[in-house]
Amino acid sequence: MSCSAAIGPPQWLAKPDFQAVIDALVAAGHRVVGPRVAAGAIVLDDVACVADLPAGWLDDQDGGSYRLRRDEAAGCFDHVVGPHSLKNFLFPAREPVATFIRDGAGWREQPLVPDPAPLAVLGVRGCDLAALAIQDAVFLRADVADSTYRGRRAGLFIVAVNCRRAAATCFCHSMQCGPAAGPGFDLAVTEIDDRFAIEAGTTKGAALLAAVATRATLTPCTPADTAAVRDVPQALGRWMHSRQAMPGAAAPRSLDTTDIRDLLFGNLEHPHWAAIADRCLACGNCTLVCPTCFCHSVEDVPDLSGDRATLERRWASCFTLDHAHMHGGGPRPTTASRYRQWLTHKLAGWIDQFGTSGCTGCGRCITWCPVGIDLTAEVAAIRAADARP
Amino acid sequence: MNVFRVAPPPRSPWHGRPARLVDVEPEAPGVATYRFDCGGPFHFAPGQFNMLHLPGIGAAAISISSAPDAATVGHTVRAVGNVTHALARLRPGAGVFLRGPWGKPWPLDALCDRDVVLVAGGVGLASLRSAIVAVGRRRGDFGRIRLLVGGRAPADLLYAREYPAWVRADIDIRTIVDRPAAGWPGPAGLVTDLLAGLDFDPRRTSLLCCGPEPMMRAVAAAGRARGLAATDIFLSLERNMACAAGLCGLCQFGPTFVCRDGPVFSHDRIAPFLAVRHL
Ligand SMILES: Cc1cc2nc3c(=O)[nH]c(=O)nc-3n(C[C@H](O)[C@H](O)[C@H](O)COP(=O)(O)OP(=O)(O)OC[C@H]3O[C@@H](n4cnc5c(N)ncnc54)[C@H](O)[C@@H]3O)c2cc1C
Ligand code: SF4
Ligand code: SF4
Ligand code: FES
């Protein structure tokens, strides 16, 4: 497969000159965030210079484990996904969605304070671009839209990266979300030796690239170079599909998605749900790190005078007992019923609701589960003992 | 005719119409009907609901119980928690926001010329009341209409003062209570007992039901056992809701959002999921 979401051929940019990309984004008024090492993990945070990027760091991930290690040969983006995703910025864990002030016996709406600067995010991978498209389908419908998400999304600038390494928890190839960065990026980079191949995916990206050209040298790729650039994520994808371990790299996971909606909805009473519940702590970490989970509750927060009220949106998780509480009790009193909700929503109900899976194969929920519950293994277990008539 | 149709801008789930509480009519212990003035007509279809928002307190999904063309919006509410208790303390003149209307209504247009059995449990009659009034206005469009109402005690039966008007509209009303008080002339038991005693032709009858979920499961099962097609049974489900617009995820039931795909569902759509515990 050689399709690409780029609108022009890639161009070479020396690695130190990636600073020109950051500078051009700042000059265009963006707040620039990207991967950074913090507290033993690679998180998304403000990036001011190329040196802030985690060059020389790799992340070893597996069920319930995440370790950073130095590897001098590792590039700026050879780590994979950390606990953060675009969701933390576009749909933050807590934020006001409306404010009201008292007006006589009634109330009047007050406009929200908009974000000071539009966001630019560096190092967005194929899986997280797919997650962004999935969250767009939730929050940006034609009939209903969340104005805070809509506002941030409109200003977002994405610098994607084509992966050349996968962790043992990755299975984007199974979900058709990677490892090549799919559509939706403004710019994409592919790291080769001491250079980046950089290409635009939108006219916004092309305009930024023109601004970069005034600050640094961009050299067009030859057709042979372009083929080599395209082959970087494709070679990784071939290896992921082969499911072979390599020296220094455990084989990635995979998920058989054949008929998965009917498989899961046809096995709602499967005994395996209770077997998972014996291990699951119902902590909700999986829903917090998942880049597509969108559940939220909205609390009315009055100020001390009682004359002003803020509607505050907070992430909710289907693993908590009070998720969807009702008079007479919540609908899912057991851990088995809550895990079933998570997995069937993600992999089955989402298809009815949004026409796509809710899973991108990023592997975060496997890594950040304290007991290492692995959805790919749980689906395989249900498939192996499919109880449908 | 308007040739150019401009798509309306997307609605915000968090912003509603300002409304003032006009008056409060007690209906039953802990239940009252609150009438709100929105300063103009409020268009909705029977079976739809509003998120009734009290700033600084919270919002709750409440069916619209008033007639579709009434000058005010009526909500019949049982005080059970945060918002509904605060509502019970509001004085006429107080301001709230009505976010809505949301949800799929009762399929009244599809019921033309059919016999209709309406089954209500407790405060579930609130959601059916606007349908009853609407059907009464177009009475000739429908065949026989029967209303089966169940409640805990006689004092819990809502809208009893309106029964005479409904009977005049040729709606056959039957009531039953779990705990009959002294002097209660009617039967004691569950609303399913009323359904068991009702004769109807399953081929020309549709059943609309709103009440506690176990009651709706039992009614749907009884209706199916009596030969009603799953596509002719409609239930109005309840789930916790924050947005009512398919955004917050709280109201999920199997693959559906109760707020957007419901609250009124035909039984064929949800039967496989209703049968599963703790879904
Ligand atoms: C489509 C639809 C239509 C409806 N129509 C009506 C109607 O017409 N009339 C009507 O009276 N009701 C109606 N309801 C029900 C109404 O929305 C609920 O009763 C709502 O919860 C009331 O809100 P509240 O803030 O007063 O209660 P809440 O404060 O939400 O409390 C509700 C119940 O949950 C419990 N609870 C509260 N917080 C928690 C927590 N954190 N964890 C666990 N349990 C908790 C409370 O003890 C209480 O029993 C409808 C619901 C839906 C979905
Ligand atoms: S379910 Fe797990 S693997 Fe899938 S997108 Fe969410 S966190 Fe990533
Ligand atoms: S129901 Fe659970 S799995 Fe689905 S979006 Fe909400 S928190 Fe995530
Ligand atoms: S109430 Fe928010 S999705 Fe249904």
Image (cartoon, grey):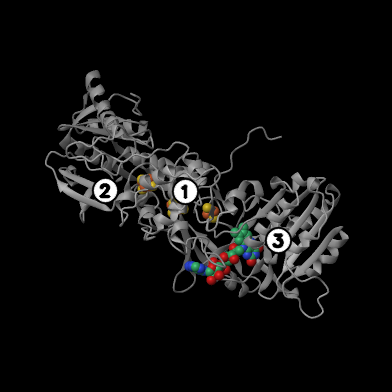
For residue B48, side relative to residue A97 (left or right): right
* Tag 1 residue: A344
Residue B110 is situated, as x and y percent measured from the top left of the image, at 75, 44
Ligand 1 lies in which image quarter? bottom right
* Tag 2 residue: A62
Front-lying residue, B271 or B248: B271
Q: Mark 2 and mark 3 in contact? Answer it, CB < 8 Å.
A: no
Helix or strand or loop: what does disc 3 sit on? Answer: loop
Q: Quadrant of residue B28?
A: bottom right
Q: Residues within 10 Å of mark 1 (few under 14, many from 20)?
A: many
Helix or strand or loop: what does disc 2 sit on? Answer: strand
Residue B206 is situated, as x and y percent measured from the top left of the image, at 76, 49
The disc at residue A104 is none
The disc at residue B65 is 3
For marks 2 and 3, give the CA distance: 54 Å
For marks 1 and 2, give the CA distance: 23 Å
Q: Are marks 1 and 3 on the same chain?
A: no
User: What amino acid is found at the position of numbered circle 2 in the picture?
Assistant: Asp
